[in-house]
Image (spheres, rainbow, N blue to C red):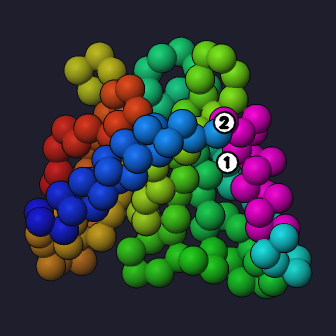
Amino acid sequence: MKALLIVLNLIALLVAQSASAQQSLISDPEIYEKKHFTEQCTKAEFSDAYITRQDINNDGLIDAVVNEGELTCDGKKGPQCNDDGCTYNFYLQVAEGGYFMIATAQIYGYDFIKRFGNMVLAMKMHPRFCDRTDGGPCIVTARVRGTKFVTISKK
């Protein structure tokens, strides 16, 4: 529980700092991220599942989620994946045009499900984030409210 709270507080702190620093908008997260990895890797390949476009904060605008586990860099698939999962970057689209990154998380994956009339993210995480030591993933359900992830439940 403490580990999850630390992670979520860190994300909230980073988002607050980013918002106060007036984070620059990017035109398209897919172009932005692919450019980064084509500069980092001698050969970068991206599967069709590398980016998912969906409204993650219930504002009617299509946002983007990048799964770096779907990157193959110099022959290694998901080079930053580890026992905690793979890096996922969550981008929100703004009405003025463009996107900004709201969070980065090391997770096994997520489902986008409807709870209490709103769409929420059910993120599969390492069991320690739910204060467990068993082998099954921890499911952290969060809603994106404004520019913050709000935890609804953990199990």
Furthest-right residue in this view: 42
Amino acid type, mark 1:
Ile
Tell me which residue sits at (82%, 58%) in the image: 35
Q: Which residues are magenta?
A: 25-38
Pointer 2: what residue? Answer: 25
- The one of 135 and 118 positioned closer to us in this rendering: 118
Disc 2 packing (10 Å; few <14; some 14–19; many ≥20)? some
- Horizontal relation, residue 96 to residue 18: left or right: right
Q: Quadrant of residue 94?
A: top right
Q: Secondary structure at mark 2?
A: loop
Q: Earlier in the sequence, mark 1 or mark 2?
A: 2
User: In the image, what residue type sits under mark 2?
Assistant: Leu
SS at circle 1: strand
* Magenta stretch encompasses residue 141: no
Q: Residue at x 19, y 38 (%)?
A: 152
Residue at (53, 76) in percent of width and height: 81
Horizontal side of residue 38 vs 68, given as left or right:
right
Secondary structure mostly seen in the magenta stretch: helix
Check the picture and name the quadrant holding the N terminus: bottom left
Of residues 93 and 19, the one drawn nearer to the viewer in this rendering:
19
Residue 146, given in percent of the width and then of the height, sits at 38, 26
Return the mark for residue 51. Answer: 1
